[in-house]
Image (tube, grey):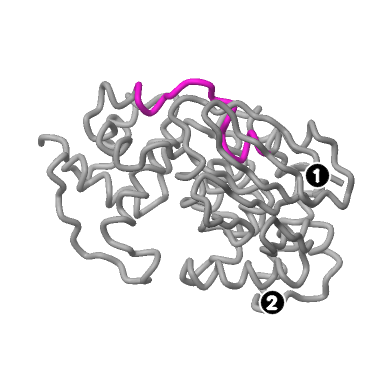
Amino acid sequence: MTNPSLTLPRPPGFSLAASSRFAMNFPASQQSQVSASLDLAFSLDDTWLPVGVHLREHDDSIQAQIVSNPGGAGTSQIRENITRILNLHVVDDPITTIGQCDPVVSHLQRQFEGLRPVQFPTPWEAAAWSVIGQRIRITHAASIKQRLSGRFGTRMEFPGGQVLHSFPGPDTVLALPAMPGLTLRKFETLRGVARAALDGALSSAHLLQLEPEAALAELQRLYGIGPFSAELILIRGAGTPDLLPANEPRLSKAMAALYRTENAADHQQIAKQWQPFRSWVALLIRQWLEAETHEIATGISAHQIPVPHFAATP
């Protein structure tokens, strides 16, 4: 029997190939040998039903073949989640528009053509990632998260025989006595976050209906969630498009090189021209920094960043 398929609009300026390269940061995603395709194993927001989809890019659409749906999730739910994860609901090309006023953004748009933020599948998964990654290297955290998905998540097989696992839902985490690779403190923190998720505190719909400042304050009331984690959950989990992270050292360092000022107030002022997509531009800036320094890949912090030829005039 043929697996059901969904057709989603492909907005101007969107590239699934660029999203695929970015999504390699996620243990539950994988770029196939065909660059304009992407396999995703994820759980739906709020229901935690596991789903696997094989995405392919066409001239004016994204085809999503549902290859695994053991919980019987509705196609409308799956469509909504894919749309949010890939930010397909924004029907125009905001980065190109912003680049018309900011030459730095214009250059980054050309360097990372077609890249839009790829969200964590749920704010719950973003919160779990923030807990797992506390005080360890990102590559180490990704390895732990992948092992946890393989042991406690749902196994899914994709075209070509590729196997991925969705990250376990909060109900699964609460039923476990421990999780290998996590300290007792991290596991207890993760259990607290899982309870909050089941209570609705980490629903993307709930977080997005709040003003960003209110959402950040609410998230920081969760045990173990500080300012950095709260911004990550809101931006990379819920998908808030217009928040400039104030607690991201890599972003501050990159902006200092690109705009030739280390003053945080200057950064906030510069970012005003990116509204209402400050989160999107911040992603491009962090991508530029990683392309220049490979800090995340190597775990070695760059002490100096060369000022690029397209940097703003001081």
Element class at badge 2: helix
From mark 2 to mark 1, how far is it between C-alphas?
Answer: 41 Å
Q: Which residue is drawn at 44% across and 24% down?
A: 276
Q: Which residue is drawn at 79% across and 51% down?
A: 68
- Give percent across and percent down for residue 13: 43, 29
Q: How many labels does the image show?
A: 2
Q: Which residue is drawn at 30% across and 53% down?
A: 289
From the image, tell me which residue sits under label 1: 3
- Give percent across and percent down for residue 263: 23, 42
In the image, the segment drawn in magenta is: 82-97
Q: Quadrant of the C terminus?
A: top left
Task: Report the mark closest to the observer, 2 or 1.
Answer: 1
- Judge whether residue 91 is colored magenta: yes
- Judge whether residue 60 is colored magenta: no
Element class at badge 1: loop
Position of residue 111 relative to residue 292, above or below, is above
Q: Looking at the image, which is closer to me, 224 or 56? A: 56
How crowded is the residue under tag 2: few (<14 C-alpha within 10 Å), some, or many (20+)? few
From the image, tell me which residue sits under label 2: 184
